[in-house]
Amino acid sequence: MKIGVFGGTFNPVHNGHIRLAKLYFEKLGLDRLIVIPTNIPPHKTVSDMIDSADRLNMLRLAFENYPNVEISDIELNMSGKSYTVNTISALNKLYPNDELYLIVGGDMFLCFESWREYKKILSMCTLCTAPREIGEFNALKEYQKKIDPENDTTVILDAEVLVLSSSEIRQKIKNGADLNDLLPEKVLEYINQKGLYKND
């Protein structure tokens, strides 16, 4: 079975994340997708990170109609920073007979050598990415030659770029902007009900 592993802060999950999940599911021919919210991201600092329970609840709402998508709290149950090598090692033990496909953003792909035990990660799964910015595809292909000269442990999808970030959405929430086209309806309701991201 081919299992996609899609991690991130998801602070909050938005329509761009859902679009990416569908894209990878289709293009990689996945049987299942595991979506994993990060506990403490090792590669970036988020000043307005909300509680992990809220991020988990929003993910469950966003993907509730996708039967082949599982929301996992595996990293939330690990103490300290969420290092991908630990997550993939744990998933390999859970699914020893399945192929794992780790999905990362273009920005994370381009600094992959700085990840803890990145070569071990590549030995346990296939690393997958797609451009997040217009014109990024060529940079991804160049970097791919560096970390995967044999071109057998990475996949780069040449997908249509959707410029949308969680930080941008958090700012829009603070500004009271219309988010109907950016967030799943139930996620937007959840944010409004709990008053998330309203305060600095």
Image: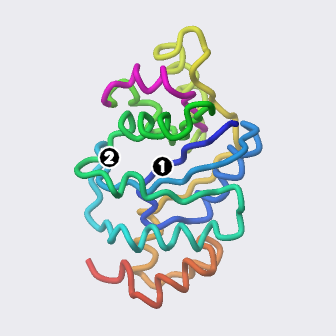
Q: Residue at x 48, y 20 (%)?
A: 123
**Could you say where residue 186 lies in the image, as x and y percent from the top left?**
60, 81
Q: Is residue 89 above or below residue 188?
A: above
In whole angstroms, how far apart are the C-alphas of marks 2 and 1? Answer: 10 Å
Q: Which residue is mark 2?
A: 82
**Could you say where residue 75 lies in the image, as x and y percent from the top left?**
37, 52
Mark 1 nearby-residue class (10 Å; few <14, some 14–19, many ≥20) = many
Secondary structure beneath dot 2 equals loop
Horizontally, residue 149 falls left or right of residue 99, namely left
Q: In this view of the protein, which residue sits in the foreground, 61 or 141?
A: 61
Q: Is residue 142 above or below residue 50?
A: above
**Could you say where residue 76 lies in the image, as x and y percent from the top left?**
35, 57
Q: Which residues are magenta?
A: 116-130
Mark 2 nearby-residue class (10 Å; few <14, some 14–19, many ≥20) = many
Q: Considering the image in quadrants, where does the N terminus appear?
A: top right
Q: In this view of the protein, which residue sits in the foreground, 29 or 171?
A: 29
The disc, 2 or 1, on the residue closer to the chain's N-terminal end is 1
Q: In this view of the protein, which residue sits in the foreground, 126 or 146?
A: 126
Based on the picture, tell me whether residue 95 belongs to the magenta stretch.
Answer: no
Tag of residue 7: 1
Residue sitting farthest toward the bottom: 193
Horizontally, residue 89 falls left or right of residue 106, namely left
Query: Would you say the residues marked 2 and 1 are in contact, meaning their CB atoms lie under 8 Å apart?
Result: yes
Q: Considering the image in quadrants, where does the C terminus appear?
A: bottom left
Amino acid residing under circle 2:
Ser
Q: Is residue 20 above or below residue 2?
A: below
Q: Quadrant of residue 11?
A: bottom left
Amino acid residing under circle 1:
Gly
What's the coloring here? rainbow
Q: Residue at x 25, y 63 (%)?
A: 47
Q: Residue at x 63, y 66 (%)?
A: 63
Secondary structure beneath dot 1 equals strand
